[in-house]
Amino acid sequence: MDAQQRQVTGRVRWRKFAVLAVPGFAATAALAVALAQGALAASFAVSGQEFKVSAKSLEGEGFAQYGSVDQNVRGKLLPVAVTAIRKAKINDLCQSVVTSLPGLGDISLKLSAGTGDKPVEAENLFLDATQLGGDATFKNIEIGRDASTLDKGPASAQGLQDAFGQQADRVQMTNMRQVAWATNAGSFKLSGLSMKIGFGKQECF
C-alpha cells in the first residue's frame, strides 16, 4: 500500500530479478548438507539431463521462490531455484529434451500444449530451474523474506530457515524461457497435447 492506501503493483525484469536472487544461492551449501543429513527430502531422483521449457505467457496465483537442491541417482547434488505457484494458467507451453546416443546422434523429444484458446492449467506447480528468462509482473511482492516463512505459494513451498526467499500474491510472465532439472504438480491439465520425437536437435528455444 502507498501513502494513500492504494495497492501497488510491481514490475520486475528477470535479469534484474536474478541479481536480487543471488543471495539465495549462498545457502546452497547449507541446503546440500541438510539434504545429505536427511533434513530435506527430494521428491524424486532427477535424470541426468536438463530440459527446456518455454511459454508465451503464464498467469499464476500464489507465487514463491527460494533456493534448494535436487539429487540424481548417483547422489550428485544439483543447486536449483524453486519457483512454486498455487494455481497457474500457461499459454503456448513447449517442453523439449535432447538425448545424444552413440551411433545414432541427437534424438529430440518435444511436447507442446495450450496452443489454442484453452491454456494449460496446473495446481501446486513446482519448477526446479537453473536458468529462467522473460518479463514478469508481480502483485504485492516480498523480496528477501526468510524462506522458511513463505506462505503465499503451495503449502509445502518453503526453504530453510535464514535462507533467502521471495513471494507475491500474483505473477504474470511473458516470453518465458527456462532450463530445468524437474517439474512437478499436484494436477497438470494439458489441453491440445502434442508430442513428437525425431532425429536432430528440435528444441523449444
Image (spheres, rainbow, N blue to C red):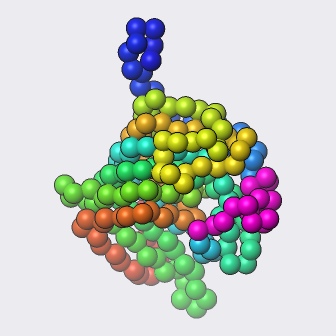
Q: How many marks?
A: 0
Front residue of 82/13: it is 82
Residue 172: percent from the left, percent from the top? 38, 40
Q: Is residue 99 magenta?
A: no
Residue 46: percent from the left, percent from the top? 60, 72
Front residue of 33/134: it is 33
Residue 55: percent from the left, percent from the top? 38, 54
**Residue occupying the point 49% across, 80% down:** 107
Give the magenta part as a residue range. 29-43
Residue 102, compared with residue 152, is above or below; it is: below
**Residue occupying the point 64% across, 33% down:** 144
Residue 130: percent from the left, percent from the top? 61, 55
The image quadrant that residue 43 belongs to is bottom right
The image quadrant that residue 110 belongs to is bottom left
Residue 8, compared with residue 170, is above or below; it is: above
The image quadrant that residue 10 belongs to is top left
Give the quadrant of the C terminus. bottom left
Asked if residue 154 can be seen in this view, the reply is yes
Give the quadrant of the N terminus. top left
In the displayed structure image, the side of residue 115 where residue 198 appears, left or right:
right
In the displayed structure image, the side of residue 96 where residue 93 appears, left or right:
left
Residue found at the very far top of the displayed protein? 4
Residue found at the very far left of the displayed protein? 117
**Residue occupying the point 45% across, 13% down:** 2
Front residue of 4/115: it is 4
